Amino acid sequence: MKNFFRFFFLPFTVFVFLQGCFSQASGDITPEQAESMLSSGKNITALDVRTPGEFAAGHIPGAINIDIGNPKFASLINSLDKNGEYVVYCRSGIRSAKAAGIMKEAGFKKAHNMKGGISAWGGPLE
């Protein structure tokens, strides 16, 4: 019985726990889900974490820009409402996944990473 616990139950329990942690932390959504959320009329903010130059070249309408490459990124996001809901995006989804993780660590409840970034976005740009 000890061997069963040691070799099956304990590793299985750890695996299930870690799966829950990673799936909760990721918060990935598709560009289609993001577009639906942003056009729903709910108070959801699009957060562009690209550079100001990338942002100026085209961004989701109404988005705010906080560059994850800025050394003050962590303090800048703290000016946002931690109870708000955010669709976080970059060019391809890599920087935004990192940003959404930082936001969740900082206590944000709803920071969703848009998979594929603006490159996968099919909606309007401004």
Image: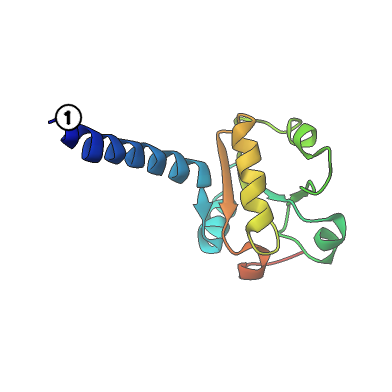
Q: Between 28 and 79, which is closer to the camera in this rendering?
A: 28
Figure quadrant of residue 39: bottom right
Q: Position of residue 18 (x, y in %)?
A: 41, 40
Residue 17, compared with residue 119, is above or below; it is above
Q: Position of residue 118 (x, y in %)?
A: 67, 64
The residue carrying mark 1 is 2
Figure quadrant of residue 75: top right
Q: Amino acid at mark 1?
A: Lys
Q: Quadrant of the C terminus?
A: bottom right
Going 63% across and 67% down the picture, which residue do you hit? 123
Describe residue 27's horizontal placement relative to residue 96 as left or right: left
Going 75% across and 35% down the picture, which residue do you hit? 74
Going 77% across and 56% down the picture, which residue do you hit? 50
Figure quadrant of residue 95: bottom right
Check disc 1 and report its element: helix, strand or loop. helix
Q: Position of residue 117 (x, y in %)?
A: 64, 62
Going 56% across and 62% down the picture, which residue do you hit? 31
